Image: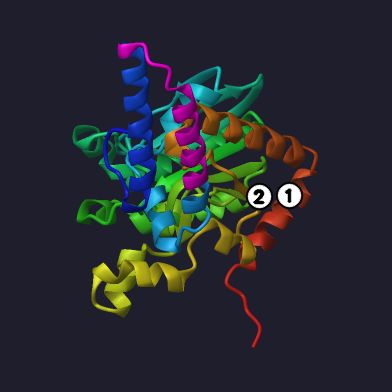
Amino acid sequence: MAGIILDFERPIIELERKIEEMREISAADGIDLSQEIEKLEEKLNKSIEKIHSNLNRWQRVQLARHPNRPYTMDYIERITSDFIELHGDRYFADDKAIIAGLATIEGRKIVLIGHQKGKNTKDNIYRNFGMPHPEGYRKALRVMKLAKKFNKPIVSLIDTPGAYPGIGAEERGQAEAIAKNLFEMSRLRVPLLIVIIGEGASGGALGIGIGDRILLLENTWYSVISPEGCASILYHDAGKAPIAAEAMKVTARDLEKLGIADEIITEPPGGAHRNLSKMAEILKEAILRNLDELSKVPIDELIKKRIVKFSQMGSWDE
């Protein structure tokens, strides 16, 4: 695969290259290497399964950040039959770090909101590396209110390293914009489905992350702070992020045990970045199934459960 290769992926990539080389030799010289290729493919599948079944927390954080990992627009292009993007917060600007609009999935009309990162340096600058400004959260809320007006469920795809911490964002009310979204989403009278597709960091994620169900892709993380941020505070060394990740318990499995994740969506072998089409199919099925289930619950009961769900997070017994 082109692009960045994570250390623990190298044995997989090396086997893939050998398989590709043997296929090229077979095609060029007319030599039948099918048995050898089949053996290597079997070895490759076992290697993928072994490596990915033993990943530590930091390695899963790395997978969540993989530059080839699919982003919100990648899923929109593959799971929706149409998408009308809406722009601007009607106050200041259009934040490119947040995508928001009207979509159709298998005939079901929904409102879809999500963070959007860039595929390269130029695109990342345009998207502000997926870090929203306050106008992004205000745009999201404006579109959510349209969902309420037309009684359409909301699907929120989360993938951000956090809300943008710049002076300008703070001057324009970053904290107030996020806080208002938390308040409004907690009582919004439509079903809200939250899916963590990559990184779910701090208030940047929570600003569009209050919902009735929280789904996490298998190789994602969700926490009040990044492992690097935690390591900088506790150990005065961001390089100790792997240690912090273990202590913080940020992975999907951790959050399921803590009662925060309602469902973990299994990724294709090797991670979502290795088979985007398959990942999109899996995600679409999970979205439609959960929306079907949520649509059967009376809205007053849904809101009550939503408030209880988030009120119980962080509670403990002594």
Residue 154 in percent (x, y) is at: 59, 37
Residue 273 in percent (x, y) is at: 42, 37
Q: Taking the image as drawn, is residue 241 in sight?
A: yes
Determine the residue positioned at 47% across, 22% down: 34
Tell me: 170 left or right of 243.
left
Q: Nearest the camera: 191 or 19?
A: 19
Q: Nearest the camera: 311 or 246?
A: 246
Q: Taking the image as drawn, is residue 220 in sight?
A: no
Q: Is residue 187 above or below residue 311?
A: above
Q: Secondary structure at mark 2?
A: loop
Question: Is residue 133 covered in magenta?
Answer: no
The residue segment tinted magenta is 29-48
Tell me: 149 left or right of 241.
right
Residue 38 in percent (x, y) is at: 50, 29
Q: Is residue 63 above or below residue 148?
A: below
Determine the residue positioned at 74% across, 35% down: 292
Q: Earlier along the polypeptide chain: callout 1 or callout 2? A: 2
Which quarter of the figure has residue 257?
bottom right
Q: Nearest the camera: 20 or 302?
A: 20
Q: Which mark is residue 212?
A: 2
Q: Which mark is residue 302?
A: 1
Quadrant showing the C terminus = bottom right
Disc 1 from disc 2: Cα separation = 7 Å
Q: Which mark is in front, 1 or 2?
A: 2
| Callout 1 amino acid | Leu
Residue at the extreme front? 31
Marks 1 and 2 close (CB-CB < 8 Å): yes
Tell me: 186 left or right of 29.
right
Prevailing SS of the magenta stretch: helix
| Callout 2 amino acid | Asp
